[in-house]
Amino acid sequence: DSGVTQTPKHLITATGQRVTLRCSPRSGDLSVYWYQQSLDQGLQFLIQYYNGEERAKGNILERFSAQQFPDLHSELNLSSLELGDSALYFCASSPQPEWEPGLNTDTQYFGPGTRLTVL
Amino acid sequence: GQQLNQSPQSMFIQEGEDVSMNCTSSSIFNTWLWYKQEPGEGPVLLIALYKAGELTSNGRLTAQFGITRKDSFLNISASIPSDVGIYFCAGLGNSGYALNFGKGTSLLVTP
């Protein structure tokens, strides 16, 4: 158990709909990352938040957005869903906002994921 | 993000055999990580490497950070059935904490 929790575990919805995925980081971790895992693209970084602020953006679509709340949990919002959005969505957390040479050696721990199926 | 080249794509071996997989990149990374993912679960961190040339072990697993900082390998000795899963390498560059992942090596172990 990594200490990162994600809900729901499974989500089935229809095209055009909007869903919200939730993540609670490990106790004490301030940074949250969202990744998408699909069969053809593998694990792709979407977005990072640190202590409530957006820190880095990856391959995140404009239809997707995220936020991190004062209690440090994070939500990933996916709207106008398409068939191709079906994938596993993982949240990861770490204490630091970024790797600092010589200052920290921590890394990211992943949650169990949310499997999204768009029909 | 940068795509890592991970090989082999899959391996089918007998229990007791040793396994070796590797990961290469055209870019330099400051950190190399190896994760294992089992069906229905998230990736679990196996080994983290922070210095070029570093060799680190975790039980029957050994990983090395290449001296060029563009590659890493993972060895599993005396494989057992519970080693089954997909192994991912991940690299961390200079820009923040976004991990770049390889496509994974799928390992199957027969008793």
Image (tube, coloured by chain):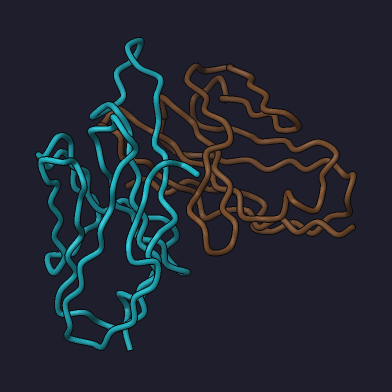
Vertical position of residue A9 compared to residue A96: above or below: below
Q: Is residue A87 left or right of residue B40?
A: left
Residue at 39% over, 72% down: A10
Vertical position of residue B109 compared to residue B100: above or below: below
Vertical position of residue B55 compared to residue A93: above or below: above
Q: Is residue A54 left or right of residue B17?
A: left
In the picture, residue B63 is in which quadrant? top right
Q: Nearer the viewer, residue A83 or A111?
A: A111
Vertical position of residue A29 compared to residue B53: above or below: below
In the picture, residue B76 is in which quadrant? top right
Q: In x, y percent, where is residue A65?
A: 13, 60
Q: Is residue A82 left or right of residue A63?
A: right
Q: Nearer the viewer, residue A1 or B12?
A: A1
Residue at 14% over, 34% down: A51
Residue at 81% over, 56% down: B109
Q: Which chain is brown?
A: B
Residue furthest top in the image: A102
In the picture, residue A99 is in which quadrant? top left
Q: What hue represents chain A?
A: cyan
Q: In x, y percent, where is residue B14?
A: 88, 54
Q: Nearer the viewer, residue B75 or B109?
A: B109
Q: In x, y percent, where is residue A22?
A: 25, 58
Check the picture and name the quadrant holding the C terminus of chain B: bottom right
How many callouts does the rendering have?
0
Q: Is residue B97 left or right of residue B103?
A: left
